[in-house]
């Protein structure tokens, strides 16, 4: 990371904004269905610059305990008051000011993103360069929700493969797994395919999970409980399919435990889940040293959070295609003047402009805004 290249700044005021963007198609996981992306944005003002950050949290606490409303409350009452109007400080000192707040990782990550955007603009450095990224283009995969039938899923996969996506992730749950994998493998014998269970199984499902071994899947993501590492270790010892952790790694401490226990072999990194891009980079470094490949997850982000995901994915340890898909996979109109697009080879360009490197479409942003609130001391 090149944090030392960033100036000290002062945060004069902040704004919380909630946007609602309809999804092009409903997104169903083992924990529920989403038809919109409702995102909390944090805007930080100071020294003539505005930094923006997107909070990963969703509407319901089905993926994590945080929601955009709990994040809003943590931000307005605790996190933002810790940095607003204080004397100039560098990024790490600013982050330290909210370290006392327990949990609320996605809320913290949103402010950290806004700070990095603002500091990147001040120093004329892109987020990718600040974080230590090395790639200019990212290999992209796509995450496909549970469809009404296996047949429908096959058609959706076909459509994304035609667009160039390099890896297919299928949401699954008990009863929508073996048949799905079987059908996918007979139609797409060698496509890189993985499953994501979002904690829908328990060790009682071991026989079923073991049967997945014959489908040559890249991995199965978070099969067991969101807060479990011990059972994941027991499972990984008994199946060949690599286990990838998502929900159950919220910190470097969690990752160290997972490595010690061998709770899996791969990590999905989401900056929101681990309280920011800086901790995400530390976790990436740790995985790289331990020999765990990582990939960048997603939370159906708008172009704002997507820009940060692409910057993160430009680090060298992100060797597997992640859930960094193009804007049109989610929205008919993103919040940017230039949406993120997938090249025919299934890659996307990492933004090179200062900070997040995105140009907000202000009209679109205003049109999508359903709540706006100033936060001052
Ligand atoms: O488990 O990775 C997940 C979306 C919302 C919440 C959790 C998850 C997801 C995805 C979508 O899989 C990834 C994306 O395309 O942003
Ligand atoms: Mg997941």
Image (spheres, grey):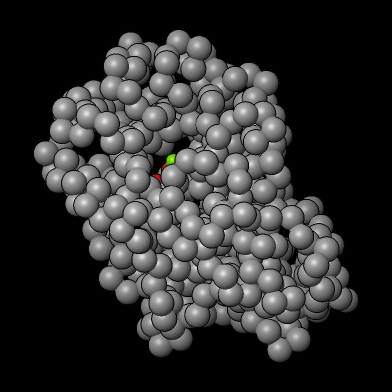
Residue at 52 percent across and 63 percent down: it is 350
- Rendered location of residue 175, percent (x, y): 23, 26
- Rendered location of residue 67, percent (x, y): 50, 55
- Rendered location of residue 77, percent (x, y): 68, 66
Tell me if 325 is positioned left or right of 164 in this view. right
Tell me if 322 is positioned left or right of 84 in this view. left
Q: Nearer the viewer, residue 128 or 258?
A: 128
Say whether residue 227 is visible: no
- Rendered location of residue 138, percent (x, y): 47, 54
Q: Nearer the viewer, residue 359 or 209?
A: 359
Compared with 254, 155 (above or below) is: below
- Name the residue at the left extreme: 151
Tell me if 360 is positioned left or right of 81 in this view. left
Compared with 193, 145 (above or below) is: below
Q: Nearer the viewer, residue 159 or 236?
A: 159
Q: Quadrant of the C terminus?
A: bottom right
Q: Quadrant of the N terminus?
A: bottom right
Residue at 80 percent across and 78 percent down: it is 10
Residue at 48 percent across and 72 percent down: it is 18
Q: Quadrant of residue 84?
A: bottom right
Residue at 60 percent across and 42 percent down: it is 317
């Amino acid at each position: 990371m090149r944090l030392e290249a960033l100036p000290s700044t002062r945060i004069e005021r902040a704004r919380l904004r909630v946007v609602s963007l309809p999804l092009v198609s409903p997104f169903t996981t083992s924990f529920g269905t989403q038809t919109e992306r409702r995102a909390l944005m944090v805007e930080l003002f100071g020294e003539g610059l505005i930094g923006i950050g997107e909070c990963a949290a969703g509407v319901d606490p089905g993926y994590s305990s945080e929601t955009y409303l709990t994040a809003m409350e943590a931000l307005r009452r605790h996190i933002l008051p810790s940095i607003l109007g204080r004397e100039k400080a560098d990024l790490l000192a600013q982050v330290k000011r909210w370290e006392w707040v327990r949990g609320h990782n996605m809320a913290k990550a949103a402010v950290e993103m806004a700070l990095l955007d603002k500091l990147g603009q001040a120093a004329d450095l892109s987020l990718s360069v600040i974080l230590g990224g090395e790639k200019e283009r990212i290999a992209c995969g796509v995450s496909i929700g549970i469809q009404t039938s296996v047949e429908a899923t096959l058609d959706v996969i076909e459509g994304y493969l035609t667009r160039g996506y390099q890896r297919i992730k299928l949401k699954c749950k008990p009863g929508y797994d073996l048949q799905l994998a079987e059908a996918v493998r007979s139609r797409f014998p060698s496509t890189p395919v993985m499953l994501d269970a979002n904690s829908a199984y328990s060790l009682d499902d071991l026989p079923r999970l073991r049967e997945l071994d014959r489908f040559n899947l890249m991995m199965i993501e978070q099969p067991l409980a969101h807060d479990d590492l011990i059972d994941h270790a027991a499972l990984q010892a008994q199946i060949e399919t690599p286990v990838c952790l998502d929900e159950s790694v919220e910190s470097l401490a969690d990752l160290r435990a997972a490595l010690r226990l061998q709770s899996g072999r791969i990590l999905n990194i989401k900056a929101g889940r681990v309280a920011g891009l800086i901790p995400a980079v530390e976790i990436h470094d740790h995985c790289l040293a331990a020999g765990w490949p990582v990939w960048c997850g997603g939370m159906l982000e708008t172009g704002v959070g997507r820009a940060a995901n692409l910057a993160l994915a430009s680090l060298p340890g992100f060797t597997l295609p992640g859930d960094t898909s193009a804007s049109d996979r989610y929205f008919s109109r993103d919040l940017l003047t230039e949406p993120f697009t997938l090249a025919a080879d299934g890659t996307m360009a990492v933004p090179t402009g200062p900070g997040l490197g995105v140009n907000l479409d202000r009209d679109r942003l205003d049109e999508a805004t359903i709540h706006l609130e100033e936060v001052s001391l």
